[in-house]
């Protein structure tokens, strides 16, 4: 025997002691489930680039919402996939547009049992797939876009959204939307601000999911992956402008940003495990290269450990159902 006084293995010896000293946890209430709702379809359509994820009809969305409530999940993030797009993304503000229809159907169906967050961005609705309106020289016009965002926010609030998720990375979007909502009396509709959103290759599969028409890139408005301090600036600005929750996106390549955000703000932090991050795991698991359930649990816990209060993930429902099976990382 050696005289080793500090033996960290004592705290790892049995499942009970590991449970006792675990530093973070992940419960269904920590998860946000993104859902895609497509206009003009009668059956849910699998998304080829995102194994296990569907473009829903309004009816199939309703049944998933019931399942989320049963599984203890508290929030859903809705994305619309319209059948027609135009230069200014008019469908985003149209009460008959698919996202507003989905939000309204969701709110009528679940009331306040789930927090209904609606994605607030024009990229699904514009013909060129940009997150805002493009001016004559091909540049996304920040301030002109804000007018559309304000109208979209009010339309989503009218449809019944509890929160809007500002994902377009325009300067001043949180402040402009906050004023527009307040002016119309929607002081209780919250803003989940995608504060630190990077121009990421990991959004690739999502662009299939929403049938994106984007040909260029979003480098002139989303953040440069090389930067960390810039995120702190974006987060501080969104907090000043009235964000209720700030989100870091993607999650996995940016866990340092999640940690710093958690340490430097007093509002809840969310992080989004995006489509490409999910698909990497699904494809590796499909090839028998990794244990899928353990990999998912490890990834979701890593985001919590980094400091996120909320994790937006396509695995929210599945993970929440499996909590009773106690899959630990
Ligand atoms: C833009 C938006 C995107 C995602 C969520 N909101 C795509 C983009 O910025 O290009 C990506 C989500 C994912 O990849 O899972 N409205």
Image: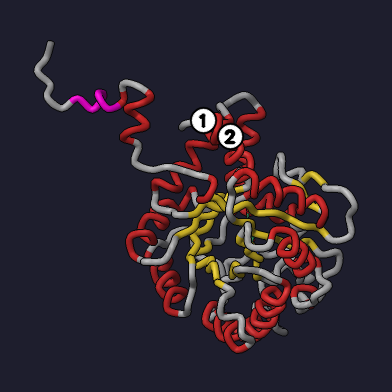
Task: Indicate the secondary structure of the residue bearing disc 2.
Answer: helix
The structure residue drawn at horizontal position 80% and vertical position 77%, both measured from the top left corner, is: 94
Report how far apart the C-alphas of labels 2 and 1 lie in the structure: 7 Å
Q: In which quarter of the image is residue 139?
A: bottom right
User: 117 above or below 9?
Assistant: below
User: 169 above or below 177?
Assistant: above
The structure residue drawn at horizontal position 71% and vertical position 49%, both measured from the top left corner, is: 66
Where is mark 1, residue-wise?
327
Viewer-side residue, 165 vs 208 = 165
Task: Indicate the secondary structure of the residue bearing disc 1.
Answer: loop
Evaluate if marks 2 and 1 touch, with contact meaning CB atoms under 8 Å apart: yes
Q: Quadrant of residue 147?
A: bottom right
Which labelled disc corresponds to residue 160?
none
Q: Which residue lies furthest to the bottom in this view?
A: 183
> If the image is split into quadrants, where does the N terminus sit?
top left
Viewer-side residue, 170 vs 312 = 312
Mark 2 packing: few (<14 Cα in 10 Å), some, or many (20+)? some
**Position of 191 compared to 2: left or right?**
right
The structure residue drawn at horizontal position 42% and vertical position 78%, both measured from the top left corner, is: 240
- Which portion, as a residue range, is magenta? 7-11
């Amino acid at each position: 025997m050696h005289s080793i006084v500090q033996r960290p293995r004592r705290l790892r010896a049995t499942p009970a002691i590991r449970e006792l000293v675990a530093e973070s946890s992940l419960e269904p209430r920590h998860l946000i489930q993104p859902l895609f709702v497509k206009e003009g379809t009668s059956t849910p359509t699998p998304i080829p680039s995102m194994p296990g994820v569907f473009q829903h009809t309004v009816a199939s969305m309703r049944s998933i919402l019931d399942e989320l409530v049963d599984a203890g999940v508290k929030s859903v993030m809705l994305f619309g996939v319209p059948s027609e797009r135009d230069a200014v993304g008019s469908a985003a503000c149209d009460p008959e547009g698919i996202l507003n229809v989905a939000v309204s159907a969701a709110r009528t169906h679940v009331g306040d049992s789930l927090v209904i967050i609606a994605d607030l961005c024009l990229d699904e609705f514009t013909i060129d797939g940009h997150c805002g309106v493009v001016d004559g020289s091909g540049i996304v016009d920040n301030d002109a876009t804000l007018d559309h965002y304000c109208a979209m926010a009010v339309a989503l609030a009218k449809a019944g959204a509890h929160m809007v998720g500002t994902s377009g990375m325009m300067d001043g979007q949180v402040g402009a939307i906050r004023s527009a909502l307040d002016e119309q009396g929607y002081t209780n509709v919250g803003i989940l601000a995608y504060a630190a959103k990077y121009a990421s290759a990991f959004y690739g599969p999502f662009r299939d999911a929403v049938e994106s028409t984007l040909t260029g890139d979003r480098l002139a408005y989303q953040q440069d992956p090389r930067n960390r301090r810039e995120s702190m600036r974006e987060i501080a600005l969104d907090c000043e402008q009235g964000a209720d929750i700030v989100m870091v996106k993607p999650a996995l390549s940016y866990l340092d940003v999640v940690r710093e955000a958690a340490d430097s703000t007093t509002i809840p932090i969310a992080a989004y495990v995006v489509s490409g991050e999910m698909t990497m795991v699904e494809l590796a698991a499909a090839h028998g290269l990794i244990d899928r359930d353990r990999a998912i649990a490890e990834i979701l816990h890593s985001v919590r450990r980094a400091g996120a209060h909320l994790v937006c993930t396509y695995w929210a429902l599945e993970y929440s159902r499996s909590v009773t099976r106690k899959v630990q990382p």
